[in-house]
Image (tube, helix red, strand yellow):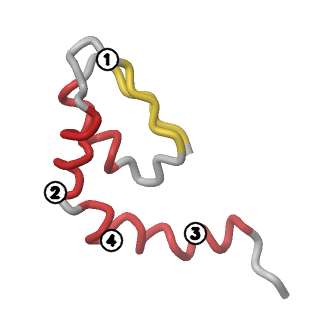
Amino acid sequence: MTPTDRQVFGQRAAIYASSAAHKDKAVLDRVVELARPWPDALILDVATGTGHTALALAPHVRWVIATE
């Protein structure tokens, strides 16, 4: 039996959430630096996953919309 997309995602979600590569502070700081956010900015994070990028940018902008 072939697993559904939901089953596959469910199996991998915990790994993604705790992945050192996705929550690395140096990497997220670099994303913020490259994005050059400003206080009135609106950020759209498409395919946000567990939201590490959205959360890194949130303190620097007015609003973040994150969607999976």
Contact (Cβ within 8 Å) of mark 2 with mark 3 = no
**Is residue 26 positioned above or below 65 on the image?**
below
Q: CA distance from mark 1 to mark 3?
A: 33 Å
**Nearest-to-viewer mark from 2 and 3:** 2
Percent across and percent down for residue 13 are 49, 67
- Say which label, 4 or 2, has the lower sequence index: 4
Residue position for label 2: 25
Residue 41 is marked as 1
- Taking the spot 21% from the left edge, 62% from the top edge, the residue there is 24
Label 1 crowd (10 A; few <14 / some 14-19 / many >=20): some
In front: label 1 or label 3: 1
What separation in Å lies between label 3 and label 4 (alpha carbons)? 15 Å
On the picture, is 3 further left or further right than 29? right
How many residues crowd mark 3 within 10 Å: few (<14), some (14–19), many (20+)? few
Q: Quadrant of the N terminus?
A: bottom right
Viewer-nearest of labels 4 and 2?
2
Query: Which picture quadrant has residue 3?
Result: bottom right
Q: Helix, strand or loop at disc 2? A: helix
Please indicate whether residue 68 sits to the left or right of residue 52 in the image. Answer: right
* Residues at discs 4 and 1 in contact (Cβ within 8 Å): no
The earlier-in-sequence mark between 1 and 2 is 2
Residue type at numbered disc 2: Lys
**Which amino acid type is shown beneath numbered disc 3?**
Gly
Q: Residue furthest front?
A: 34
- The x and y percentages for residue 47 are 53, 47
Q: Which residue is mark 3?
A: 10
Residue, far top: 40
Name the residue tied to disc 4: 19
In this rendering, the label closer to the viewer, 3 or 4 = 4
**Residue 43 as seen in the image, left or right of residue 47:** left
Q: CA distance from mark 4 to mark 2?
A: 12 Å
